Amino acid sequence: EEKQIVNFGPGPAKLPKSVLLQAQKELLNYSGLGISILEMSHRSSDFNKILNKTESLLRELLNIPGNYKVLFLQGGGSGQFSAVPLNLIGLKGDRCADYLVTGTWSAKAAKEAEKYGKVNVVHPKLHSYTKIPEPSSWTLTPSASYVYYCCNETVHGVEFSFTPEAKGVELVCDMSSNFLSRPVDVSKFGLIFAGAQKNVGCAGVTVVIVREDLLGHALKECPVVLDYKVQAEMSSLYNTPPCFSIYITCLVLEWIKNNGGSAAMEMLNKQKSSRIYDIIDSSNGFYVCPVDVSCRSRMNVPFRVGRKDGDEALEKKFLDGAHERGMISLKGHRSVGGIRASLYNAVTLEDAEALADYMTHFLREHH
Ligand code: PMP
């Protein structure tokens, strides 16, 4: 009997068991073709079926309007930190863009964009990434080509519960760590991107959803593989796409569909994260989540143990005890320390409850 492992990793993250089993079953002989998907031409009609199915599942699950293109690209979320300005900062003559900087990932995106144009951070600089500045304190630039934000900061556990009002400027969103964890009105966005390795698959593919009229404005130095117009015209087949990763995303999207779609995912994600936040909030300061209640993430729950700034010896003990129970990858990001429980779609309510039980037990032993 294998030891049961519960993976709370921030990404690459847990995948549904049924997806892994199907991938295993099909690995040597895909659909009776006698070869593996790993060996199949990306120009074959069989791979094309996978690509088309992945796109149509995504369109269905997110209700993507017909005037948006869906691209499957390489380079990760970080590749999009460059691709977004390379393709969009030239939309307007001023070559400037507005950024909301609410954590590590939007900070990196803003820094990358500075290579290609002027970046305005629209709110007073945050001293710690524990809240989203009040929209009334933002100064948006009317001549900006786009307004950029990250709607779930994976390291800090800060998540937008609302869609920012961009006042007529194109809205661009990094949804890498909460993609398909809740319904989203795609029509409010000029562009959405998400690396697959948290909620919708494994590393290697990044989904880009972009409105058609935003294509064709890339700077001349934009690398061709990052040029949305080229990739859109070639149906993401300008060069060899990450075939296997796209296939895994296809299986995960089917799993999401069979489990009730984005609305069902949202309900489950609320339940799972509430279990953990409830323990934190009723622990009398033994567990401390630094994030403002209004923007606590349902995907990544960061917390300290023992005291506000974390008792490191106790935190180590907490992680060791979790590990003994098969609960892994709970260590907070090296830049912030502490604990982080990532609760993406494939993490079950039972998984979250197992963690909640352990937290209760640990508190009784040490408080
Ligand atoms: N954006 C967010 C919100 C992320 O969490 C990450 C990775 N954890 C990235 C971007 C970067 O993704 P990648 O490692 O695929 O470049």
Image: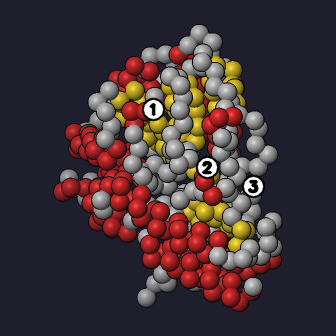
Q: Amino acid at mark 1?
A: Phe
Task: Specify the quadrant of the image occupied by residue 110.
Answer: top right
Residue shown at 68%/42% (left/top)?
133
Task: Specify the quadrant of the image occupied by residue 350.
Answer: bottom left
Residue shown at 76%/43% (left/top)?
126
| Circle 3: element type | loop
* Front residue (pair 149, 218): 149
| Circle 1: element type | loop
Image quarter in which the C terminus is found: bottom right
Which-is-in-front pick, marks 3 and 2?
2
* Circle nearer the N terminus (1, 3): 1
Image quarter in which the N terminus is found: bottom left
Where is residue 352? Give x, y as percent: 51, 73
* Circle nearer the N terminus (3, 2): 2
Residue found at the very far top of the displayed protein: 93
Circle 1 packing at 10 Å, graded few (<14), some (14-19), many (20+), is: many
Residue shown at 59%/68% (left/top)?
277
To which residue does mark 1 refer? Answer: 189
To which residue does mark 3 refer? Answer: 335
Where is residue 185? Give x, y as percent: 39, 39
Residue 111 circle label: none
What is the distance, in whole Å, between disc 1 and disc 3 at their CAs? 31 Å
The total of numbered circles placed on residues is 3
Q: Amino acid at mark 3?
A: Ser
Confirm whether residue 349 shows in the render.
yes
| Circle 2: element type | strand
Circle 2 packing at 10 Å, graded few (<14), some (14-19), many (20+), is: many
What is the distance, in whole Å, between disc 3 and disc 2 at their CAs? 13 Å
Q: Is mark 2 within 8 Å of ligand 1?
A: yes
Q: Amino acid at mark 2?
A: Glu
* Front residue (pair 107, 127): 127
Residue 153 circle label: 2
